[in-house]
Image (cartoon, rainbow, N blue to C red):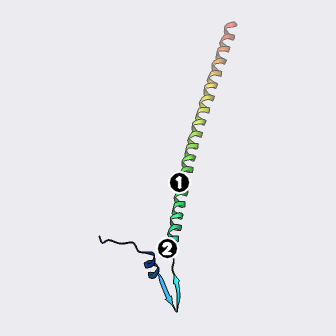
Amino acid sequence: MPYLRKQTFLEYYYSNTTHDKSITIFQLPPLQDERQRRHEEKLAKEAAVEERKKALMAQKQARMQDIMERRRAKDAQVEQQRADRETERLEALRAKEK
């Protein structure tokens, strides 16, 4: 692979300069465009990360909500069974007293 030396600023300047009737127009290197493109890519990646975080958080919230609903249903069922047993116990006591 041939050695590629860095282009000096003046070499770059003269290679990107147009001479038109004693007016020299210097074309800026595309560094600003490159920086802008990289910045936009970075912002896009950050937005994608935020979207993934939001999606994961929504999944976690849904899972937690489901767990809480099942726990409430089970607690209500246990409480109902407890109340039924108490009612049966009281009925058995009343039947025994008679």
Tell me which residue sits at (58%, 43%) in the image: 61
Task: Sort mark 1 into few (<14), some (14-19) or many (20+) by Cα contacts within 10 Å.
Answer: few
Q: Quadrant of residue 95?
A: top right
Q: Position of residue 75 (x, y in %)?
A: 61, 28
Quarter of the image that includes the C terminus: top right
The numbered dot on residue 98 is none
Q: Amino acid at mark 1?
A: Val
The residue singled out by tag 1 in the image is 49
Considering every residue shown, the one lying at the far left of the view is: 1
Q: Position of residue 49 (x, y in %)?
A: 53, 54
**Residue 58 drawn above or below residue 4:** above
Tell me which residue sits at (63%, 21%) in the image: 82
**Residue 93 drawn above or below residue 71:** above
C-alpha distance separating marks 1 and 2: 29 Å
Quarter of the image that includes the N terminus: bottom left
Considering every residue shown, the one lying at the far top of the view is: 97
Tell me which residue sits at (51%, 58%) in the image: 45
Q: Quadrant of residue 66?
A: top right
Element marked by disc 2: loop
Q: Position of residue 69 (x, y in %)?
A: 60, 36
Whether tag 1 and tag 2 are in contact, CB under 8 A, the answer is: no
* The one of 14 and 76 positioned closer to us in this rendering: 14
The residue singled out by tag 2 in the image is 30
**Residue 60 drawn above or below residue 72:** below
Considering every residue shown, the one lying at the far bottom of the view is: 21
* The one of 49 and 74 positioned closer to us in this rendering: 49
Side (left or right) of 10 relative to 65:
left
Of mark 1 and mark 2, the one earlier in the sequence is 2
